[in-house]
């Protein structure tokens, strides 16, 4: 019995053609871009010449942090009393320079006696989380994992 | 400078939408559409959840 003929249509050829291999490991410079993205939000993308993403991440992280500090949210220290404080610290430190400059931006300290201060705490944490996403994105771009 | 709860929520939705949109699309038009949709969904869900919780606050 003869085997079924192979369909020579271009659609089938496109389906069966394998995509070019994607490197499984990132380039050796990827951690440097990730570190740059952490220290100054958007810097990693700026060095990778992703201008729009660099601007978008800087505006988003700086804006969230600034609004959080304006609402007098709490900035968690390294040594916190409980695990929620530790999680808060991990989120806050994601914003890099904005975490280390928090004493300048929020010179009067946190005010959790009002609900606005509590909301500000969440906004500061959100700034760090958004920058962590930016760090991962810069790392992946530098590692040629995505376009 | 005092920022109200609603103002804080709107700013959060706006800034988070900008970040998400920059990740999701490569074209400018796609980013603008994604940011607008994301912002609208943030607002709709925030106001909707606020109204759902309103009876509990009384």
Image: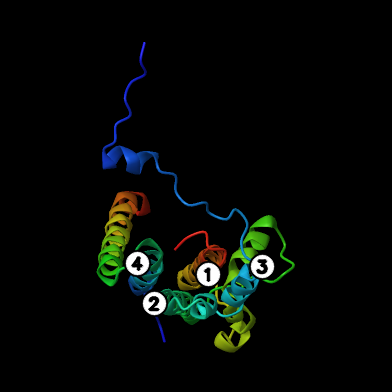
Disc 3/disc 4 C-alpha distance (Å): 25 Å
Residue sitting at 53 percent across and 54 percent down? A22
> On the image, numbered disc 2 is attached to which residue?
A52
Where disc 1 sits, the SS reads: helix
Q: Indicate which label's residue lies in the foreground, 3 or 1.
A: 3
Same subunit, tags 3 and 4: no
Q: Indicate which label's residue lies in the foreground, 3 or 4.
A: 3
Residue sitting at 74 percent across and 67 percent down? A79
Of pointers 3 and 1, the one earlier in the residue sequence = 3
Asked if B24 appears above or below A111 in the picture, the reply is above
> On the image, numbered disc 4 is attached to which residue?
B26
> On the image, numbered disc 1 is attached to which residue?
A131
User: Which disc is residue B46 wearing?
Assistant: none
Mark 3 surroundings: few (<14), some (14-19) or many (≥20) residues within 10 A: few
Nearest the viewer among B13 and A27 is A27
Please, which chain is the residue tagged with disc 4 on? Answer: B
Asked if B21 appears above or below B1 in the picture, the reply is above
Disc 4/disc 1 C-alpha distance (Å): 19 Å
> On the image, numbered disc 3 is attached to which residue?
A28
Q: Indicate which label's residue lies in the foreground, 4 or 1.
A: 4
Find residue A24 and report its horizontal and vertical position in percent. 60, 53
């Amino acid at each position: 019995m003869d085997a079924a003929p192979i369909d020579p249509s271009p659609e089938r050829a496109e389906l069966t053609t394998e995509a070019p291999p994607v490197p499984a490991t990132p380039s050796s410079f990827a951690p440097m871009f990730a570190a740059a993205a952490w220290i100054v939000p958007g810097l990693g993308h700026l060095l990778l010449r992703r201008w729009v993403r660099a601007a978008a991440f800087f505006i988003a992280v700086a804006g969230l942090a600034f609004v959080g500090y304006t609402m007098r949210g709490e900035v968690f220290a390294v040594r916190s009393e409980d695990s929620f404080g530790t999680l808060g610290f991990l989120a806050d430190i994601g914003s890099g320079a904005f975490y280390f400059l928090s004493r300048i931006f929020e010179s009067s300290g946190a005010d959790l006696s009002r609900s606005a201060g509590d909301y500000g705490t969440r906004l500061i944490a959100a700034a760090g989380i958004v920058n962590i996403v930016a760090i991962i994105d810069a790392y992946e771009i530098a590692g040629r994992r995505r376009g | 400078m005092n920022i109200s709860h609603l103002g804080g929520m709107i700013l959060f939705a706006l800034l988070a939408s900008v970040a998400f949109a920059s990740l999701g699309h490569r074209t400018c038009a796609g980013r603008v559409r994604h940011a607008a949709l994301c912002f609208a969904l943030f607002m709709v869900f925030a106001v909707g959840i606020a109204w759902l919780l309103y009876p509990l606050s009384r």
